Image (tube, rainbow, N blue to C red):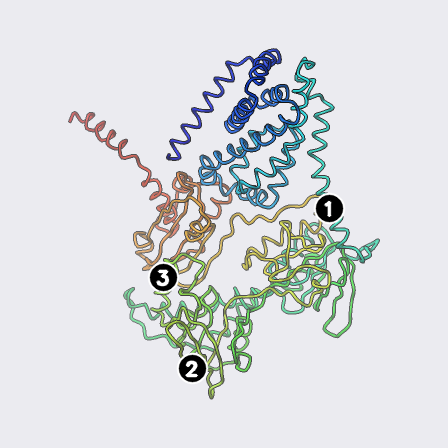
Amino acid sequence: MTKRALTIAVLLLIGMGFWAAAALDLSLDGLRDLVAEATAYRDQNAAALWVLYFLAYVAVTALSLPLAVWMTLGAGAIFGFWSALLMVSFAASIGATLAFLVARYIARDWVIARFGARLDGVHRGLARDGAFYLFTLRLVPIVPFFVVNLVMGLSSMKAATFYLVSQAGMFAGTAVYVNAGTQLAGISALGDIVSPLLLASFAALGIFPWIAKFAVARITRHRAYRGHKRPARFDRNLIVIGAGAAGLVSAYIAAAVKAKVTLVEAGEMGGDCLNFGCVPSKALIKSAKRAHDIRSAAKYGITAPAPKVDFPRVMARVHEVIAQIAPHDSVERYEGLGVEVIKGYARIRDPWHVEITHSDGTFTTLSTRAIIVATGASPAIPPITGLSDVPYLTSDTLWSEMKSRKSAPKSMVILGGGPIGCELAQSFARLGVQVTQVEMSDRILAREDSEVSAALTEALTQDGVTLKTAMRAVACAQSGDQIAVTIEGDAGSETILADDLLVAVGRSPRLTGFGLEELGIVTERKVETNDYLQTLLPNILAAGDVAGPYQFTHTAAHEAYYAAVNALFGDIWASKADYRTIPFAIFTDPEIARVGLSETEARANGVAYEVTRYDLDDLDRAIADGTTTGFVKVLTAKGSDRILGATIIGAEAGNLLAEFTLAMKHGLGLNKILGTIHVYPTMAEANKYVAGNWRKSRVNARALALLERFHDWRRGA
């Protein structure tokens, strides 16, 4: 039977059930008459009646008919307390589970497709505490059970869990109603059963698990703080460890609300992004792009000699850019904002004390109500034989090393096919370096859709990068003035000689040396936090790369807002970090940008989706600029214009993505984008055209045929 047919059948059965229920005399007198007839039948066919009653009860519950109370009372009156309790307890749970499964089969896909993004938080909560919520709801009989059945059917809860929790949770209420049924003759109104006192008792029973959960949380928190003496007074409201994106924003927010805040940084202000990551790499990318533009000038009708790369000047400009931006993150600026900045190493001694080692070796210990750990990440170093014996580079050491060079290296091996590896591989290749890029996966950018990887692979190859995918480095050794890198894969092994070796296989959170382990805070792959960015000790929070789950500067700043607010006000009101729309970009040429689900992720997660695509080779501005490589691809919920994700590869992809990020954040669909005026001719029109393609794909051919006949008629044809 198809889902449509099953849906129709279920609705017909429910309709018939409600019609039958309406035809019954649903009063205590009517129930007594039915009980009298059933009791007479029971005396002749007890077993058969028990089975029939059981099956009828299952059907009534499964179809969510308003007869359960009456049938429970009737069971108590006809079969007696224990026999009826056994019957109703199992029949109700089985019927509820059937209703749960029907709701899941018929409506879950539609609900997820239409409201999935808005319900992400609900689904996460149910996945984590769904059994607990269900149990407490079952304990309170004033909550309509059929609503519980249907809502839980839309969640990801296992059917077995639903059945077992329902069996346990409904037992107390079932016993009350069955017992009332045994006293049916003495009951004059339903109010005799569900008196205010009884309802209050059930409500207290339902609230008890929440009280118990709160008490357990308080006990756990008390144990975590056990052995540490809380100061009567504090030197600071907040101490922030680390002056990268997360630390700077946390300190800024604290100072803005007039909290007394201290920011501790052992290295350079601005953290990795300013000094080693986003800023220097983008400055290098710009120089490399200019060299590429000169080489490509002929296609624009301009004759130009091959570019001469002044490598020392290129690197000097990189450091000039860092120096120009540095005042935005400087000690002076933040002190002017009201932040106390201390250069030194911080170590958390207990939940309320931080010891700071200054550059001159002296110590300062400060007490604080809250602490935010924002220590960032450092380059991950893979376990390769001989790697420590050669002068390899990382994204942290690259810039200072290259600053002292009088010329660019002739050759370079880059390990890693992620965003960092791809950006640097293309840039150095465009500056005249012979680059070999090695990636363990069978393609670069393995987290993105295969067509995105393929497009960037072609671009890197055209720029002269030699790609070695499905290969991994197994050994390194010094070979004269060069480094010998041995790589191997299914096709065999080979050794590559290069002037430089750059390790760009990812970044690892800085977790050790800050006193977290001694306090029992979990730091296996990152600092473990809850939805409020709090650790095991709620007054110690973490934000940015050290906390994950994303390693982007903009998400570090985003988390910092929640961490700062929760650190200062979390004992009054705490807010969960919002990860619903996280955009990111890879600044290769062409650029790659994405927000929300990729097609690969949607398939892996079983999300019902539709794909709409617009190729940039059709866009007027892209044709005029000669930047026709790429596309805009949007995933929408099946049968809806609600955006699940957008992937863009092409010129200005990072800027174009902002419109889709805004739309997803505020629940705007493709129809809204289509109805928005976009300046002509701009790259941004691509967003409107992909929305137009979505609309075209939904034009009704029959309606168009009727319109054609209408216009023919109006012409008199």
The residue carrying pointer 1 sits among few (fewer than 14), some (14 to 19) or many (20 or more) residues within 10 Å by Cα, namely few
Which label is found at residue 497? 2
Image side of residue 534 versus residue 620, left or right = right
For badge 2, the amino acid type reads: Leu
Image side of residue 616 versus residue 88, left or right = left
The residue carrying pointer 2 sits among few (fewer than 14), some (14 to 19) or many (20 or more) residues within 10 Å by Cα, namely many
Give the foreground label among 2 and 1: 1
For badge 1, the amino acid type reads: Val
Discs 3, 2 touching: Cβ within 8 Å? no
Which label is found at residue 558? none
Which residue is denoted by mark 3 in the rendering?
454
In the image, is residue 33 above or below residue 590?
A: above
Instruction: Residue 31 in the image: state x and y as whole percent.
Output: 59, 14
As helix, strand or loop, the secondary structure at mark 1 comes to helix
Q: Residue furthest right?
A: 232
Mark-to-mark CA distance, 2 and 1:
61 Å
Q: Residue furthest front?
A: 44
